[in-house]
């Protein structure tokens, strides 16, 4: 009886301080204009699809070598301990994995669909992020990052030691800026056919694949600073 009662009491105490938000719950973000993501490494997928509800959630997922057998042999789940809080038009997400000494890796996921024109800020040790739709600003700071944009962002700022980036623009408003700072970067930038681009790549060693010349003063304006850079511009 004591063994059962104590965990139930602890669970009640933890729940009472959760500010009304429960792990695994999907929240309404129809009034959100910006998202700030911090904490543990995670996989992020954020879209601005007007045909779908504006919702956000975090979850844990097993993706290790042992994951396919884990749930059958062990009771322990891959719990997500992340926290989401809303302050005015800003959603803050503190990513935290519930993994301790598991036999299979747990990964944290952040999934959201927000109104078009929002801004995203990410500050994590490692991140795999995919953005689909219309954004005002994308800012990422990480030791290792894999970033994909399919759509449009007026401003992109990425600071990472190791970076792979694929930015494909569906449209241009002639006000776009892209600023990348990394130790090692592999990037693919696609702005569409015949779009004038002002690009500068500064690196100790670089490989630039582009059939178009840089047009001074044009937008999009691309600046890449790195020790090692491989850049493709289309």
Image (tube, grey):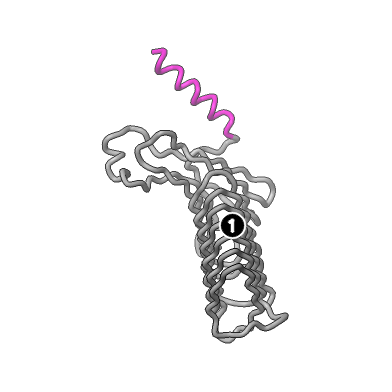
Quadrant for residue 217, please give it: bottom right
Picture quarter with the N terminus: top left
Residue under numbered circle 1 = 160
Q: Is residue 50 visible?
A: no
x, y (%) of residue 167?
54, 69
Residue that appears at 64% across and 45% down = 86
Residue that appears at 58% across and 77% down = 171
Q: Is residue 23 above or below residue 28?
A: above
> Would residue 233 be counted in the magenta stretch?
no
Of 54 and 97, which appears nearest the observer? Answer: 97
Is residue 67 rendered to the left or right of residue 234?
left
Label 1: how many residues lie within 10 Å, few (<14), some (14-19) or many (20+)? many
Q: Find the magenta span and give its range.
A: 1-18
Q: Label 1: state its secondary structure.
A: strand
Residue that appears at 52% across and 51% down = 126
Residue that appears at 50% across and 49% down = 42
Q: Is residue 174 above or below residue 104?
A: below
Of 13 and 162, which appears nearest the observer? Answer: 162
Q: Is residue 73 visible?
A: yes
> Would residue 5 be counted in the magenta stretch?
yes
Of 54 and 178, which appears nearest the observer? Answer: 178
Quadrant for residue 153, please give it: bottom right
Residue furthest to the front in view is 204
Q: Main secondary structure of the magenta part?
A: helix
Picture quarter with the C terminus: bottom right
Of 204 and 132, which appears nearest the observer? Answer: 204
Q: Is residue 193 above or below residue 77?
A: below
x, y (%) of residue 147?
52, 61
Is residue 108 rendered to the left or right of residue 183?
left
């Amino acid at each position: 009886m004591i063994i059962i009662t104590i965990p139930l009491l602890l669970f009640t105490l933890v729940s009472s301080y959760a500010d009304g938000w429960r792990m695994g719950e999907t929240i309404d973000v129809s009034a959100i204009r910006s998202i700030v993501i911090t904490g543990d490494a995670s996989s992020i997928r954020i879209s601005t699809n007007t045909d779908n509800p504006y919702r956000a959630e975090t979850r844990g997922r097993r993706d290790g070598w042992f994951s396919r057998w884990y749930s059958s042999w062990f009771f322990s789940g891959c719990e997500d301990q992340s926290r989401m809080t809303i302050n005015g038009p800003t959603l803050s997400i503190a990513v935290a994995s519930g993994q301790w000494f598991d036999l299979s890796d747990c990964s944290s996921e952040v999934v959201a669909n927000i109104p078009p024109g929002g801004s995203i800020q990410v500050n994590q040790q490692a991140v795999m992020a995919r953005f689909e739709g219309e954004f005002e600003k994308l800012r990422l700071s990480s030791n290792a990052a894999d970033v994909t944009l399919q759509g449009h962002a007026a401003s992109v700022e990425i600071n990472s030691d190791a970076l792979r980036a694929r930015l494909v623009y569906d449209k241009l408003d002639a006000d776009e800026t892209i600023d990348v700072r990394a130790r090692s970067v592999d990037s693919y930038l696609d702005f569409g056919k015949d779009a004038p681009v002002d690009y500068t790549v500064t690196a100790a060693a670089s490989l630039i694949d582009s059939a178009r010349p840089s047009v001074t003063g044009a937008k999009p304006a691309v600046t890449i600073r790195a020790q090692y850079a491989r850049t493709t511009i289309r």
